[in-house]
Image (cartoon, grey):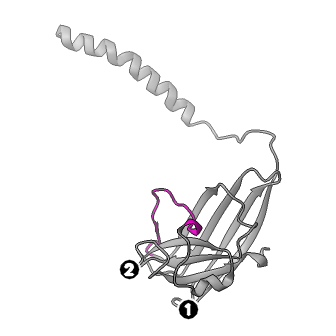
Amino acid sequence: MTVGRARLLWLLLPLTAVLCASGAGALEEYVPPEGGPPWMLGKVYLLATGEAPEARGAAAILWTQDGVHHRLQLYAKQLQPGAQYSVWLLRSAEDLNEPGVDERFRVPTGRVRLIADRDGVLAFATNLTFAVRDGFAAIVLRRDTEASRGGWSGGINVLCGLIADID
């Protein structure tokens, strides 16, 4: 063995030990932290609005009892496979037919693109910085089109649920 290889081996040995030790910790079962306020849950059933009459879905609105944390989870089925979708929160159900809705009402997805799988199923969850049940009337799932590019104009409403009907 040459001096260069021996030096490289000497440097890699501690790195390998660190990686193995951190890998062992990653295999441990996740245990959520104890304490904290309890989570509340409300369900909104999403019904077809026209384009795909067989499509159905549900949205779970979660929040901590102290109102600090908020989460939205959505599940939809019988969508167009491979199509891209966006989730919107509307202030009133009448906004559903408006040509333009404020971009702030689009649920943020970060870098994640919402695309239905090959069976037409879409599942999505995100943390929110605001309370869905306060000030919003409806949750809408829209199929994005080339014209809409993820915005409201040009998109097609697929599913809608009224937040007032929260279960």
* Image quadrant assignment for residue 157: bottom right
* Image quadrant assignment for residue 115: bottom left
The picture places residue 122, in percent across and down from the top left corner, at 53, 71
User: What stretch of residues is rendered in magenta?
Assistant: 104-118
Amino acid identity at mark 1: Gly
The picture places residue 75, in percent across and down from the top left corner, at 60, 71
Task: Give SS at disc 1.
Answer: loop
In the displayed image of the protein, which residue is found farthest to the top? Answer: 3
**Disc nearer the start of the sequence (1/2):** 1
* Image quadrant assignment for residue 70: bottom right
Circle 1 residue: 50
The residue that appears at 73% across and 69% down in the rendered structure is 135
The picture places residue 7, in percent across and down from the top left corner, at 26, 10
Left or right of residue 165, residue 24 in this image: left
Left or right of residue 34, residue 23 in this image: left
Task: Give SS at disc 2.
Answer: loop
Above/below status of 74 relative to 129: below
Any magenta on residue 37? Answer: no
In the displayed image of the protein, which residue is found farthest to the left? Answer: 2
Above/below status of 37 relative to 109: above
Any magenta on residue 109? Answer: yes
Circle 2 residue: 147
The picture places residue 99, in percent across and down from the top left corner, at 52, 84
The numbered disc on residue 164 is none
The residue that appears at 21% across and 14% down in the rendered structure is 5
Comparing labels 1 and 2, the label whose residue is closer to the camera? 2
**Mark 1 to mark 2: distance in Å?**
19 Å
Amino acid identity at mark 2: Ala
Q: Residues within 10 Å of mark 2 (few under 14, many from 20)?
A: few
Closer to us: 41 or 121: 41
The residue that appears at 77% across and 63% down in the rendered structure is 41
* Placement of the N terminus among the 4 image quadrants: top left
